[in-house]
Amino acid sequence: MSGRRNRLRIVGGSHRGRILHFPDVRGLRPTADRVRETLFNWLQGEVGGRRVLDVFAGSGALGLEALSRGAAEAIFVERARPALQALRENLRLLGLDDRARVVAGDARRFLAGPPEPFDLVFLDPPFADDLLGDIARQLTEGGWLADDAWIYIEQDSTRDWPALPESWQPHRETRAGQAACRLVRFDPA
C-alpha cells in the first residue's frame, strides 16, 4: 500500500491535509484532489448533517471527504477486498468509523435491497464497466434518493453521457484529465 500513486489527501474539513493510503486494485482511481475541491465548493452548505452513499467506493475518497466536512453518516459500497480492508482502516485511523458503514459486495445487488433514502450520492463506477445508466435508474426507481438529493457522477471523458433519469437535473459539470464529472439534483416532481 505504499507509493505516491496509492495516496489520497483529504482536501477540506476536520481532516484537511491528512494523507491516506490505498492498495493497488484494478480500476481503482480516486477522484483527483482538484475535482473533489471543486465538487465540495459546488456543494457548500449541502454536506453537513447529511446522509451519504458512496457507491463503487474504491478508496472512499468522496465519502471520506464528505465525513470530514460534517456529513452525519456515510455508507461505502465496494466489492474489492483489498480496498474494503484499507477503507475500514482509514475510517478507523480518522476516527470516523462510528459514522460510517462499509458494505462488502456488488453495488447492483446492494441497490436491489430495501432502500434507505440518501441526501448525497457519489456514483463513480469503474470506467471500463459502463454501469452508470443502469445504476442511475436503480437508484431512482428503488427509492434510494431523498427529495432534492444531490448526485455526483463521474465517467470516462471519452464517452457520451448515458441516458439518465428525467428527474436528474444537471447542475454543474467539469472535466479533469480522463474524468468527466457532473453534479445533478434529484427532482421527483
Image: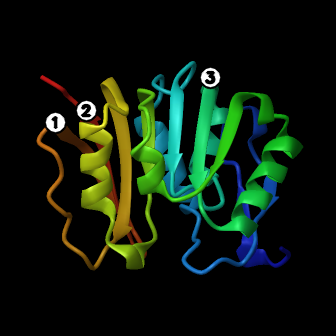
Kindly identify which numbered label has been placed on residue 186: 2
Question: Quick one: label 1 or label 2, which is nearer the N terminus?
Answer: 1
Left or right, residue 161 beside residue 124? left
Q: Quadrant of residue 151?
A: top left
Q: Is residue 118 visible?
A: yes
User: What residue does disc 1 label?
Assistant: 167
Q: Give the percent coordinates (x, y) of residue 56.
A: 51, 58
Residue 145 vertical position relative to residue 76 in the rendered view, above or below: above
Q: Residue at x 45, y 53 (%)?
A: 109
For badge 1, the amino acid type reads: Ser
How far apart are labels 3 and 2 at the CA level?
Answer: 20 Å
> Label 1 crowding class (10 Å Cα cut-off): few <14, some 14-19, many 20+?
some
Q: Give the percent coordinates (x, y) of residue 134.
A: 27, 58
| 77 vs 7, nearest the viewer | 77
User: What residue does disc 3 label?
Assistant: 72
For badge 2, the amino acid type reads: Phe
For badge 3, the amino acid type reads: Ala
